Amino acid sequence: MTKNTKIILGAIIAIVIVGAAVIIAPNYRNEIADDSAIAVDTNDNRIYSEINTLRIEQDIDTYTKEAEAIVVGEFTRKGNVVWNSDKTDLSTETYFLVSDVLKGDIKPGEEIKILQWGGELDGQVQTYEGATRYNKGQTNLLFLGTNEDGEWGVFSGDWGQFPIDSEGMTQDFNDSSVNLSAFKDQIVERIK
Amino acid sequence: MPISYPGYKRSVNYVRYELNIAGWASHPIHNAKNTWNGAGSPFLFNFLGYSAYPRQYDGHNIVTRANRGNNGKLGTAEVWCSGGSCASGRTIIETDVEFNDYYPWGAYGEPNLYDLESATVHEFGHWLTLNHSSSWCGTIWQASMCDGMGVGQFYKRTLAGDDSNGINYIY
């Protein structure tokens, strides 16, 4: 092998090595940068997460069957934010004064605690897409289920929540405007 | 466009995930991975191996299962971003998925069970930060990113045009 051949061969090898480094290095750097980042807000030191859920398809037959209780009640107040038993989910306690019970072992006149998805506690914030939202004093028809700790929650979040307006109207499962009495009839018919 | 994107994403065009689904068949998860990997985007879902990590902020992208009771939630996709809340311009640093095994799941197209592959395609879409598809889902419009799933429902296994457009737009 002549001296010139060796130089050319060396140059080719060098180009290949540098080329490979250029291709691989950005990904390697990004991976390190990705792993070293933290989800802590530098302003308030809280850890935030966003949660999306895949829910059971919204359908009056399924929801009436799967719900452990179906009630009409007025939202009275919020309580504490609490963890579930294995500290994976944050919930906010909400309280309802029940006026009517279509299904389940709850009595009219009872105040019940219902966990709302999401909240902030211990420096952590969980925000749920599809969580229920309440206005104070507002009456809602609610399909209820229980979580793994046996606590009441609205079945499928805002899909199981039907706010009643001041004229007694709500939107049913088909997004049609319906009065509360007629909506209750649709549900009771399916419970029979 | 029926599917929206909130403006934050990963800094790299891949995600490496681990499985903690003891007792469940893993092929529905792998099939879902392959579905997104075949969408024409450079973004890749890579299976790293099996582990025992739960859904929590710990540096591991986990697909797991747990009994969350009768709350109507079939699956939960949780996303953490650098610097705090996920907002436009922020970077995703961790993503987990948890399936609620209170409900009956199927891996082989059973008509009376919730389809694990369909649900995984959907939840992986959230890892890409795709939001839920708009109204009329399931009737006129069928896309993997439609919210809501019934037993014996399989259309989410196949990406609709807007699902594919979504990943290709983001990455």
Image (spheres, helix red, strand yellow):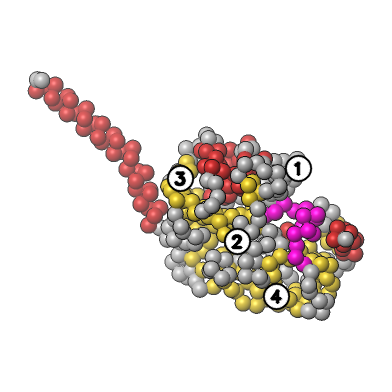
- Tag 1 subunit: B
From the viewer's side, name the closer residue of B20 and B129.
B20
Foreground disc of the pair 1, 2 = 2
- Which amino acid, mark 2? Asn
According to the picture, the residue beneath numbered tag 4 turns out to be A113
Badge 2: few (under 14), some or many (20 or more) residues near its Cα, within 10 Å? some
* Range shown magenta: A55-69
Query: Could you tell me how far apart the alpha carbons at marks 3 and 4 are, in whole angstroms?
Result: 41 Å
* Residue type beneath disc 3: Phe
Q: Position of residue B33 (x, y in %)?
A: 52, 42
The structure residue drawn at horizontal position 75% and vertical position 45%, both measured from the top left corner, is B136
Marks 1 and 2, the one that precedes in the sequence = 2
Taking depth in this image into account, of B1 and A57 the one nearest to the observer is A57
Determine if residue B129 is in view: no
Q: Secondary structure at mark 3?
A: strand
Check the picture and name the quadrant holding the N terminus of chain A.
top left
Picture quadrant of residue A167: bottom right
The numbered mark at residue B67 is 2
Taking A8 as reference, is B20 above or below it?
A: below
Q: Chain for mark 4?
A: A
Task: Give the x, y percent position of residue A76.
Answer: 74, 77
The amino acid pointed to by label 4 is Lys
| Label of residue B47 in the image | 3
